[in-house]
Image (cartoon, rainbow, N blue to C red):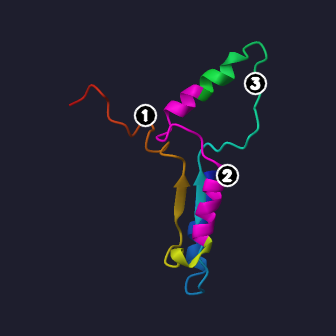
Amino acid sequence: MTSHAALGVVRAGVAILKDSGVRINCISPGQIDLGVEVKAADPEHPSQRSDSQEANMDGIGLGRTGMPQEVAKTAGFLASGFSSYMTGQNIVVDGGALTMSPLTIPFAGSK
């Protein structure tokens, strides 16, 4: 299921289950460190993976990958009473990567 489809399911679920007390929310994690080393797709260019990994870190506001526990804490918050008035939301847990997108950062040379 694509991320847009998942968000559609969340929004449709809110409309269908309104007045039932059921809350539906979505967590969209960014780059998460699962502790697994991924091999380069092209064995002839083994450095390709490390170069792209460094480029990915530059695009994350916090400059690091997230940890599974950080996503789990978000899920715990949504399951708790602290989020009792939240439904139909997409919580982005990406260390600021969405904000650091080249489409949202103003050009450094502009005034």
- Sequence order check, earlier mark of 1 and 3: 3
Kindly check if marks 1 and 2 are in contact, taking CB atoms under 8 A apart as contact. no
Q: Is residue 88 visible?
A: yes
Name the residue at 60% across, 59% down. 27
Going by the numbered disc 3, the residue's amino acid type is Ala
Q: CA distance from mark 3 to mark 2?
A: 24 Å
User: In terms of secondary structure, what is the magenta stretch mainly?
Assistant: helix
Name the residue at 55% across, 76% down. 15
Residue at which label 3 appears: 41
Crowdedness of circle 3 by 10 Å Cα count: few (<14), some, many (20+)?
few
Q: Which mark is residue 102?
A: 1
Magenta highlight on residue 86: no
Q: CA distance from mark 1 to mark 2?
A: 26 Å
Magenta highlight on residue 71: yes
Q: Which mark is residue 68?
A: 2
- Sequence order check, earlier mark of 3 and 2: 3
* Relative to 18, 102 lies left or right: left
| Residue 82 point in image, percent of width and height | 52, 75
| Residue 21 point in image, percent of width and height | 59, 85
Looking at the image, residue 51 lies above or below residue 31: above
Q: Which residues are magenta?
A: 54-78
Looking at the image, residue 75 lies above or below residue 39: below
Quadrant showing the C terminus: top left
Going by the numbered disc 1, the residue's amino acid type is Pro
Going by the numbered disc 2, the residue's amino acid type is Pro
**Quadrant of residue 20 in the image?**
bottom right
| Residue 54 point in image, percent of width and height | 57, 26
Number of numbered discs visible in the structure rendering: 3
Q: Is residue 9 visible?
A: no
